Image (spheres, helix red, strand yellow):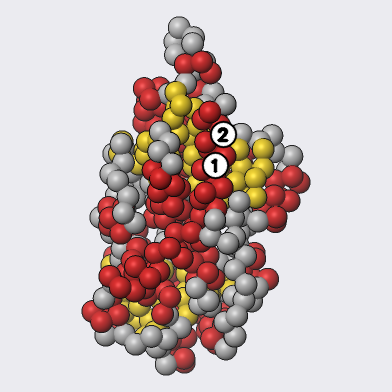
Amino acid sequence: MSGEIKVLEANSLKRLAAVIIGTRPGIVMFAPIIHELVRRRLPYLVIHSGQHYSPNMDAQFLEDLNLPDPAYKLTGGAERKTHGAQTAAMLEGIESILLQERPRLVLVGGDANTNLAAALAARKLRIQVGHVEAGERSYDWRMPEEHNRRIIDHISEHLFTTNEKGKANLEREAVQGRIYVTGNPIVDASVQHLEIAKKKSDILLRLGLEPRKFAILTTHREENVDFRESLAGIMEGVSRAGVRLGLRVIFLAHPRTQKRLREFGLLEWALSLKGLELHDAVGYLDFLNLLSQASLVFTDSGGVQQEACIHQVPVVTLREKTEWVETLEQGANRLTGTDPEAIINGALEAAGIVRDWPVPFGDGTAAPQIVSITQEILED
């Protein structure tokens, strides 16, 4: 080890895996991996970056997914106003923990700032990085998530892809890490918890909903909610589409989205839109129960696109491009952007499709495969 402790020597690292979470998709993705680590009695710890901080965005998800409290939870990063400041705060916090704990492997999953911060911290300390959900590409440089996933892929030693398409993307970019096609653990989580959700969640009863008589709306991406015209276009288009289709639209509003509605003076207008019902974001079991019984989903979330596809629910994606091109190829998804007319047309088309597409994200055995590889790394 150097005198200034800027890097860690391999012989100073412990037989320990550090799992990084910090966002709703990350918690869902890593739930089956954490459960598998526990089942095999492998040494691990969970670090929560604090990127999502409201109870229904992280604490409720941990409870719903039967996960232990993280060993560490950072604070302060969520309040930072820019990507650089947020990423820097999380990088510094995670680096400090890694210096103390000295794991042999750091596992990150997806494309949030949390994952970039953790991957950079580990890379600089010479700790191996494993990237779950590697190789996905939207080729939309407006999206910070696209920057993050590309950087993470190129500094990771171990790349766990959802399918052969992700592997081909990585090979084309000549990444240095080793590529494994494992499937996506979001399938494991979603399938494993659906029956639990149906038994424990009474969200349909609480909201007075009938199966297949409603749609869901989620939007949180900055290219949508940080611009008044885009956010207004989404709500107008989704509201009108719901009226055309005779569906109640349950708008599960992310805290960031609610903040922007107030700042833009759109909240009262949104509440007045016919058929659009504004609600706080919900926990995972409630969300999974809603999603599985919805007629249609409107979203800009990558994770929601996947979960809807898994449960045979057609999606209207409120973006110009998606990293989950498989959902387009299977006919499960429609890209519309934020133009109201495009949203309406996409919804009318999606509502009429047959729900019989194959799931392109694996067979629900991703977590055991990823943990088997993790075990080999820890024992090497």
The residue lying toward the viewer, choosing from 254 and 314, is 314
Q: Which residue is rendered at x = 68% and y = 71% of the image?
A: 329
Q: Can residue 298 be seen here?
A: yes
Q: Quadrant of residue 54?
A: bottom left
Q: Can residue 228 be seen here?
A: no
Q: Which residue is rendered at x = 73% and y = 51% of the image?
A: 168
Left or right, 20 with reference to 271: right
Mark 1 and mark 2 in contact (Cβ < 8 Å)?
yes
346 w.r.t. 66: above or below = below
Which residue is disc 2 drawn over?
376
Q: Assess disc 1: are there few (<14), some (14-19) or many (≥20) residues with their C-alpha within 10 Å of its C-alpha.
A: some
Left or right, 107 with reference to 283: right
245 w.r.t. 282: above or below = below
Residue 73: numbered disc:
none
Which residue is disc 1 drawn over?
372
- Inter-mark Cα distance, 2 to 1: 6 Å
Q: Position of residue 297 (x, y in %)?
A: 47, 76
322 w.r.t. 370: above or below = below
Q: Position of residue 66 (x, y in %)?
A: 31, 54
Q: Position of residue 130 (x, y in %)?
A: 55, 38
For mark 1, give the secondary structure.
helix
Q: Assess disc 2: are there few (<14), some (14-19) or many (≥20) residues with their C-alpha within 10 Å of its C-alpha.
A: few
